Amino acid sequence: MTQNKIYSLGEIASALGLELIGDDLCKINSIGSLNSATSGQISFLSNPLYMDQLARTQASAVILENKFSSSCDTNALISENPYLSFAQATALFKPALNCASGIHKSAVVNQSAVIHESVSIGPNVVVEANVSIAPRSVIGPNCYLGEGVVVGENCYLQSNVSLYHRVKLGDSVVVHSGSVVGADGFGFASDGHEQVKIHQLGSVSIGNHVEIGACTTIDRGTIEDTWIGEGVKIDNQVQIGHNCRIGDHSVICGCTGIAGSVTIGKYCVLGGASGVVGHISITDKVQVSAMSLVSESISESGVYSSGTWHMKTSDWKRSNVRFKQLDLIHKRVRKLEKKHTT
Amino acid sequence: MTQNKIYSLGEIASALGLELIGDDLCKINSIGSLNSATSGQISFLSNPLYMDQLARTQASAVILENKFSSSCDTNALISENPYLSFAQATALFKPALNCASGIHKSAVVNQSAVIHESVSIGPNVVVEANVSIAPRSVIGPNCYLGEGVVVGENCYLQSNVSLYHRVKLGDSVVVHSGSVVGADGFGFASDGHEQVKIHQLGSVSIGNHVEIGACTTIDRGTIEDTWIGEGVKIDNQVQIGHNCRIGDHSVICGCTGIAGSVTIGKYCVLGGASGVVGHISITDKVQVSAMSLVSESISESGVYSSGTWHMKTSDWKRSNVRFKQLDLIHKRVRKLEKKHTT
Amino acid sequence: MTQNKIYSLGEIASALGLELIGDDLCKINSIGSLNSATSGQISFLSNPLYMDQLARTQASAVILENKFSSSCDTNALISENPYLSFAQATALFKPALNCASGIHKSAVVNQSAVIHESVSIGPNVVVEANVSIAPRSVIGPNCYLGEGVVVGENCYLQSNVSLYHRVKLGDSVVVHSGSVVGADGFGFASDGHEQVKIHQLGSVSIGNHVEIGACTTIDRGTIEDTWIGEGVKIDNQVQIGHNCRIGDHSVICGCTGIAGSVTIGKYCVLGGASGVVGHISITDKVQVSAMSLVSESISESGVYSSGTWHMKTSDWKRSNVRFKQLDLIHKRVRKLEKKHTT
């Protein structure tokens, strides 16, 4: 990790493809929020609710829409989508962590593995037979790559990642620490007394530009591969069961659990701690709100929820007593209605 | 991992104890679903809903019940329980992964550990004092076995598993990557200002034939051991609190959380992302549906649920407004009824 | 791990600052529950419900309130808060695990790291550049400490912990196995087609006396640090999103998920598997019950819940049918009321 990077504002405008109003030689060393930014920092305005913060900001430059530029007393970068431009700016300031190419001497790498010379393999990594790793990928410390694993170009595995045998990562895949890809799907057949294991003979196929959070698990398929589409973003502590298929560019927030053999469309968003029961399909562009359970297939795009809102526990208990009686209460209403119509 | 295994159909029939109708010399190299299987693959029919797939399958052989054999145009293996026979067949085709017996030279093993010569200890494994490991067990790369850990025969620990001091595994226990057995139970006593730690002096005892998924945690007991019965199957991302006792052959699906001091009977099934509050008991043969919370002891076998079904969020909000008023609505119904009876 | 420790009862009374009624030379070798304790064990009575167990206990001594001492036939230690005294007693009997100071020869430690000579660094630990570790801290086997990590005094990291670059731990912080602190917050900006990563430039700051369970994840902030206050206790499998701020002495039970940019007050208790949606605030001394979702800010201390109680699934389905119709049912009640008032 080197010292903070420093750019001129002109360099940043050029890197992000934005029009600059102000001093192109102004030095920028980091990013700050409108509220907290100090001199030398660049900030952004993506929500008009924060206009008052714009007026008071100490930032040396602000990324904003043209229509707000007259309200900006400091240097401005004009963007049609300031939030997206901010995202692009973060890439300029991310720390350059040490990941020298080559294989650390403490790593245990099988001779049959095919590893490009530009790849970085960290300390204590274990690479089994017939693994292949494409150019510029980084395998962090203490990772395990099972037999026949395939890692594409420009992948980044943080420390302590486990990839079971034959798991395939596309290009530019990021996997955070503690995650496990390719463990056995949870499949058993009862013999009436014990659960007999169904060995999981498929694997997991991860598309290009997928990001997988920390302590997330994606199970291998029973016969065919569990499949994660291109550009899918998966947060921490997510569980994806065997045989699932997740469509391109879908987003799965933290703590979500998806049971086995689920098919999810493209551009879906599963909110935090949501769940999906097994063997169902969800079409494209479905959003599921936090801690909601999808218990049947969804064939119409839209926003879906389950559960109840939080209440003071004393009030909630009263509602719950009545929830238990709800069918009975309904019968009583119907009876009253009948009396009125007769 | 060697090449795919190849069997004659006669060998498979014999291994599974099934009657063969057709060519016992037919070569089988893998398993496929009825829909996707190609020549050289064996498939199975366990659900009559898929009869149409049977008619079209390209599989070289199908495991099915006798009553469906006349509808099978290819070789048939006759089974009273095709799903169970399929499970048994998967064992024939599971890959033989490299786990040579002996201790990898990079492993750090305390001299006092008692490790059978048939045991395989992978790279970078750390084994503390007084550990014992019985014949034919495999300890995957980067595992940690704390002081006094006992591992039975034929166990398989995948990579990056942590067993804290004095954890005991029975025979034929499987633990998937990233799982932690024996971390401190979550116990504190408030002194009115701070939380004072209750050190967890018990351990964890895991029965024979237990399987534990990836990134699952089972805490050590406060005074006595947390206890997992024989044949219990635990999926990924499950949390089992301190002092719990899980009865034989129960099944705990992914993302389930069980608080401390819970006793669960035999042959229970906890659905995915379900929860159990602390200090309660659940009798034998209870099933809990996905994302349901068990908030009181259950003394009667059966199927239990909590929560609400998913709805379009706009409709769900309207129901939620009324859920908050539910006790009031009930009072209004009662008032109407009184008017009618007076 | 040495043999069980043995104390005289007088030594224990002195260590806990309690009055002793009985034999101060009585030898105590461990702690037991009233029910299971045998000779040589000390037990405690914190709940009058267990008075009958007190009468029958085989423990050699019992910690209890003065008012119950006359019912105690064995040696007694008099405490105003027996549960707290029990917690303090557990510290006397916790095993002394091997963690010799010094750096294990298999550890990979960057030359620029500043590590006090009293620190213990276990096998296969990886320590990157510019890390600093203060006196008497223990870094367990297979841990990873990224560039610029700061670890305070008397910290204890169990095996397989990952701390990303620049994470800061205060003094006396415990982190259990498999946990990941400082992974990237889940931040993306859509360009209308793909999700563009917002690199997470902040870090994580953990206060003194924090305990973090196993397989828990705490994400780094986008611009500023995610912040965990003093004395916060976090259980297993918890997810804390980027930019969160958790107030001093709050307790977060297992499987809880907290989305990004949440502020939680002091002395809060989040029950097991509870959830908090993003960008909200919760005031001090709020309790949230198990598997409840906090979906709006809470400005009043108290106890909050969401969801419904478990029921037999057949009954629950009937209630759920009516939950879907709840707004309609309400309309029908209103209509009936109108008929009555007109």
Image (cartoon, coloured by chain):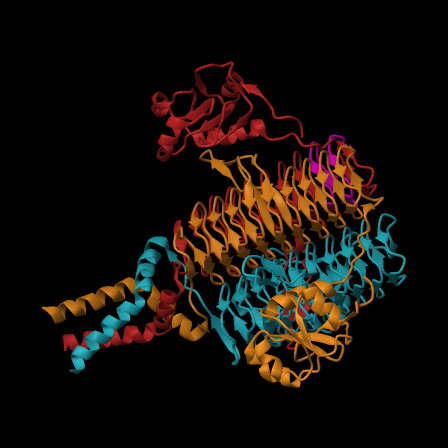
Chain colours: A cyan, B orange, C red
Q: Is residue C9 left or right of residue A313?
A: right
Q: Nearer the viewer, residue A270 or B86?
A: B86
Q: Nearer the viewer, residue B18 or B279?
A: B18
- Which corner quadrant of the image does residue A55 belong to? bottom right
Above/below status of C162 relative to A69: above
Where is residue A4 shown, x and y percent of the image?
A: 76, 54
Q: Residue at x 78, y 75 (%)?
A: B25
Where is residue A278 shown, x and y percent of the image?
A: 55, 69
| Boundaries of the magenta span | C117-143
- Which corner quadrant of the image does residue A273 belong to? bottom right
Where is residue A174 shown, x and y percent of the image?
A: 72, 63
Q: Residue at x 50, y 38 (%)?
A: B188
In the picture, the quarter occupied by the C terminus of chain A is bottom left
| Residue A201 seen in the figure | no
Q: Nearer the viewer, residue A28 or B297?
A: B297
Q: Nearer the viewer, residue B226 or C190?
A: B226
Q: Main secondary structure of the magenta part?
A: loop
The magenta stretch spans residue C291: no
Q: Residue at x 67, y 39 (%)?
A: B149
The magenta stretch spans residue C141: yes
Q: Is residue B267 left or right of residue C101?
A: left
Above/below status of B315 relative to C160: below
| Residue B164 seen in the figure | yes
